[in-house]
Image (tube, coloured by chain):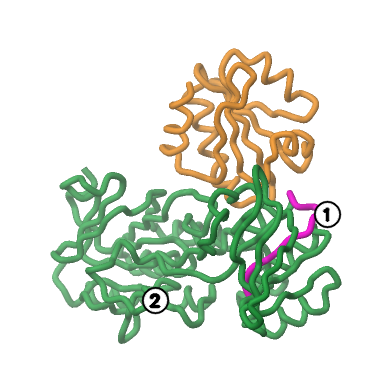
Chain colours: A orange, B green
């Protein structure tokens, strides 16, 4: 079984970002968000296909509003790429797989 | 290469119109290919405008209402049950000048089309209009939004503005009133265009107030939205309204850029149809909001999608394919 997405919470966020051997793309999402549902299967695919290069973290904003507020997330889906613990890129809004990959690729 | 063998019918778009056309074409054994679009956070996405709505209360057959995204998932599954093929790609170019018609996805400068078809059903719908005032694009996603259902949650206990006066504006105001400390509906006219039932609900809501004859002249903020500059269109008076969120629902513009110069459009850019769903090119049909600036309902879009499928079927019977 290849890698899949990881679940990130308010309590585990700092530890998971700090300990990751690869950059982490954190997907801020919620059950009630239609565009988030469109992006979810794409992120699952990227998690599997790019497992050696990037980790996909899923953060549910309903349950983890502190982290969402900390990064001033005001629209979902928002995806933030963390590299060496720093936020290096932010994507707001759903996109196609090729567009997402191009955005991520530029920072890996 | 998929473009070698022309399809009988390609449907561009996957809202209520496109997917109803797909159901009817599939049941007529036309093996439709639906190019449904690509994920986005505006209405230009698979499933169309209903993907950004919550409860749909007026679609017949659902006594207690149904969620917009769920309704569209049902349309899609029903089309697939009868064999409609659906690709999650966005059309980048069409050539309707010769037959079979040519359709490109991806790089539009490629010489060979991605697909070709003997008939085409255009169901590309409409997208939300923006204000086009200073500050708006910079603060999109930082307090300015076109999707109340996506972003309303982040403005809990904050003052919010909704711009517009139609059903979607009032619907958004009512939805946002669940989260916000207050909702101000800003409308450029002195009365709403929304349906009576929606107006009554908004007027009765204690958190919702109205600013009439007012237009937004600037969106103010740094890393996040702080407020709106307003001008009263009657008195000329200017003012500032402090808000944490601003939701824009000022109407729609048809997605017809792909067809400009090939299909006849009206002054507002909507596709012109005659005798049902026919366009100016025989074999090309249009349905849904891309050709309807008047009714713009899920049920009328679905009805026109059915008409386009029947028109396409009759057209294909009359030409040797």
- Badge 1 element: loop
Whole-percent x and y of residue B153? 74, 51
Residue B144 falls in which quadrant of the image? bottom right
Q: Chain of mark 1?
A: B
Whole-percent x and y of residue A107? 48, 24
- Is B35 or B78 nearer to us in this picture? B35
Q: Which residue is mark 2?
A: B268
Whole-percent x and y of residue A7? 69, 29
Q: Which residue is mark 1?
A: B157
- The residue sitting at 60% across, 45% down in the picture is A36
Q: Chain of mark 2?
A: B
- Is A97 or B139 nearer to us in this picture? B139
- Is A4 or B292 nearer to us in this picture? B292
In the picture as drawn, the residue positioned furthest to the right comes out as B206
In space, the residues marked 2 and 1 are separated at their CA atoms by 39 Å
Specify whether B292 is left or right of A9. Answer: left
Specify whether B206 is left or right of B68. Answer: right
- Quadrant of the image containing the C terminus of chain B: bottom left
């Amino acid at each position: 079984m290849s890698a899949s997405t990881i679940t990130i919470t308010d309590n585990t966020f700092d530890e998971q970002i700090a300990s990751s051997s690869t950059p982490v793309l954190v997907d801020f999402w919620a059950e009630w968000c239609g565009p988030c549902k469109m992006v979810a299967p794409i992120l699952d695919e990227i998690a599997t296909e790019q497992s050696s290069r990037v980790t996909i973290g899923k953060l549910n904003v309903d349950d983890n509003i502190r982290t969402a507020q900390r990064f001033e997330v005001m629209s979902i889906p928002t995806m933030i790429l963390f590299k060496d613990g720093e936020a290096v890129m932010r994507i707001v809004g759903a996109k196609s797989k090729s567009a997402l990959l191009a955005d991520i690729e530029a920072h890996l | 290469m998929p473009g070698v063998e022309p399809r009988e019918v390609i449907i561009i778009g996957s809202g209520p119109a496109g997917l109803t056309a797909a159901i009817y074409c599939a049941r007529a054994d036309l093996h439709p290919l639906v190019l449904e679009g690509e994920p986005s956070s505006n209405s230009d996405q698979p499933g169309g405008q209903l993907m950004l709505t919550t409860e749909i209360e007026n679609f017949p057959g659902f006594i207690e209402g149904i969620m917009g995204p769920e309704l569209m998932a049902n349309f899609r599954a029903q089309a697939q049950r009868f064999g409609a093929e659906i690709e999650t790609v966005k059309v980048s170019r069409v050539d309707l000048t010769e037959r079979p018609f040519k359709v490109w996805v991806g790089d539009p400068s490629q010489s060979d089309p991605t697909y070709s078809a003997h008939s085409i059903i255009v169901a590309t719908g409409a997208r939300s209009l923006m204000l086009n005032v200073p500050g708006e694009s910079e603060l999109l996603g930082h307090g300015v939004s076109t999707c109340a259902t996506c972003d309303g949650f982040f403005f809990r206990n904050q003052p919010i503005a909704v711009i517009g006066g139609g059903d979607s504006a009032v619907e958004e105001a009512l939805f946002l009133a669940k989260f916000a400390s207050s909702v101000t509906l800003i409308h450029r006219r002195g009365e709403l265009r929304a349906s009576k039932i929606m107006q009554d609900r908004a007027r009765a809501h204690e958190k919702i107030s109205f600013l009439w004859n007012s237009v937004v002249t600037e969106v103010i903020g740094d890393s996040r939205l702080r407020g709106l500059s307003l001008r009263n269109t009657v008195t000329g008076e200017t003012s500032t309204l402090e808000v944490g969120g601003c939701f824009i629902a000022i109407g729609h513009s048809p997605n017809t850029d792909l067809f400009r110069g090939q299909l006849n459009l009206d002054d507002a850019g909507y596709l012109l149809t005659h005798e049902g769903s026919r366009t100016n090119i025989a074999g090309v049909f249009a349905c849904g909001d891309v050709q309807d600036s008047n009714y713009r309902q899920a049920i009328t879009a679905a009805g026109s999608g059915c008409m386009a499928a029947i028109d396409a079927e009759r057209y294909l019977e009359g030409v040797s394919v």
